[in-house]
Image (tube, rainbow, N blue to C red):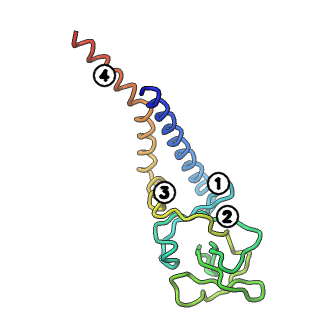
Amino acid sequence: MRIMIKVLRGVLTAVLCAVLLLNIWMLVQQTVLKREAPEVLGYSQYIVTTGSMEPNISVGDLILVKAQEEYELGDIVTFHDAGGATVTHRIMGTVSGQFITRGDANNTEDNDLLPPERIIGKLRLVLPGMGYMIEFLRSPLGIVLLVAAGVLLIKLPDWIGSVRETGKRYKH
């Protein structure tokens, strides 16, 4: 039983450390390197803020996108619109080498044609509701709680062990 607890403690500690380091790396990319969309292994993450792609992608979902050589009809892509906003919509067609896009929940195509150079990447993964958790973990309170959870995970078994030893000494 003790070996299993030690293994579980090691795994959880590694996961918490990885999440903390990943979080710090993403913050450094955004604040120091001034990247709009931090990348890890070529993937950028975005938190969905509108319902234009319902029911496939909802507000609060975390999406991972990756740049591709080519994009095809039906691909869901994240791009900068003519005004500079980041949008995730489906490619509905092409005209003169540019794409026609539309949100799945929208009745009409987007007003502007999308040149390929404004595409950030193709949707690779949707993690439902994870955007809310990511936003929290990026907050100062989230980082503090993540560090506190790591410290507790590492030190709590030692503290419990010392309390047990102290209790055994006083029972005799």
Dot placed on the residue nearer the N-terminal end, 1 or 2: 1
In the rendered image of this protein, does residue 35 appear above or below residue 109? above
Direction front: furthest residue? 1
Dot placed on the residue nearer the N-terminal end, 2 or 4: 2
Identify the disc placed on residue 66: 2
Going by the numbered disc 3, the residue's amino acid type is: Ile
Residue 166: give x, y in percent of width and height: 29, 17
In the rendered image of this protein, does residue 39 appear above or below residue 52? above
Going by the numbered disc 1, the residue's amino acid type is: Val
Contact (CB < 8 A) between labels 4 and 1? no
Dot placed on the residue nearer the N-terminal end, 1 or 3: 1
- The residue mark sitting in front, 3 or 4, is 4
Residue 55: give x, y in percent of width and height: 48, 76
Dot placed on the residue nearer the N-terminal end, 2 or 3: 2
Dot placed on the residue nearer the N-terminal end, 4 or 1: 1
Q: Secondary structure at mark 2?
A: strand
Q: Quadrant of residue 66?
A: bottom right
**Cα separation between marks 3 and 4:** 36 Å
Residue found at x 40% / y 35%:
152
